[in-house]
Image (cartoon, rainbow, N blue to C red):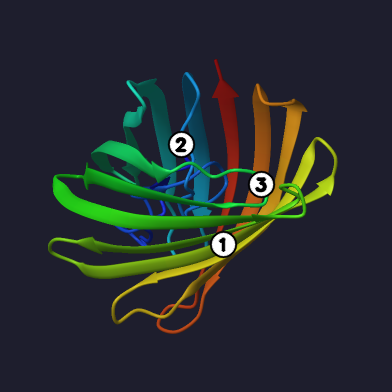
Amino acid sequence: MLKGLLAALGALGICSAPAHAARPFFTDDARIVDKCQIETFYKKERTYSGSEFWFLPACNLFGAELTAGGNRIEGDKNTIVQLKFLLKSLETNGVGYALSLGSFGGEPYFNAIGSRSFFDDRLVLHGNLGDFRDSGGTWGYGVEALLWAPRVYGIFESFGQHRETPTYHYGVRFWVIPNRFQVDTTRGDQTGAGNRRFYTVGLRFLF
């Protein structure tokens, strides 16, 4: 699941929330959670004194993934709802496709998702194209690589929105209990106006 919402991308404001992929990705992937999960993370921006907190529970409902949560960005609170459908399941050494539809703070969006597995899932690539009704097109691509089986993964991605410079985001994911409890930490950079930099620490629980 945050296999699916944050990838719509941004904040970068609005965009960061929606594409929603498995932590710590913002770019979404063509997978859905088997049963239920909770993803949560804390984000600190260098360019302002406040912080962000995200809470994103999701469940598999009849083959689609429903996310219903929210965030706090400084003093502002936003409701996040997303439904993700698999068009083709991602298999080992294969390709998968998905589509997500949602609302972030009342603004609707959609996201088209593609993923490709290599080397028995040791390397997986993701690509997104989406749109916010009022804010314009979004895009993202990401790479997740198994660094130390079965617990440690490295991630790198770039994402952005129409008329904005790209954001580069990278970090590590560590399974404390494989496929049950994960911790992660990342750094992101966006060049251009403001020269934004942010850091995140997150948790993911699967049930």
Q: Is residue 194 left or right of residue 143?
A: left
75 relative to 36, above or below: below
The front one of 47 and 28 is 28
> Can you give x and y, in whole percent of width and height, for residue 206 in the image?
56, 21
Q: Nearer the viewer, residue 198 or 8?
A: 8
Name the residue carrying label 1.
142
Residue sitting at x 74%, y 38%: 174
In this image, 16 relative to 93: left or right? left
Rendered view: 65 above or below 125: above
In terms of image quadrants, where is residue 56? top left
- Mark 3 or 2, nearer chain start: 2
Which residue is the site of mark 3? 185
Q: Which residue is mark 2?
A: 1
Q: CA distance from mark 2 to mark 1?
A: 15 Å
**SS at badge 1:** strand
User: In the rendered view, would you say 179 is above or below 24?
Assistant: above
Name the kind of residue labelled 1 in the image.
Gly
Q: Amino acid at mark 3?
A: Thr
In primary-sequence order, the first of circles 2 and 1 is 2
User: Which of the image's four quarters has the C terminus?
Assistant: top right
What SS does tag 3 mark?
Answer: strand
Say which of marks 1 and 3 sits in front.
1
Residue 149 image offset from top left, x and y in percent: 85, 39
Q: Residues within 10 Å of mark 3 (few under 14, many from 20)?
A: some
* Residue shown at 15% from the left, 51% from the top: 107
Given the image, on which type of amino acid does mark 2 rest? Answer: Met
- Please, what secondary structure does the residue beneath circle 2 have? loop
Residue 152 sits in quarter: top right
Q: Nearer the viewer, mark 3 or mark 2?
A: 2
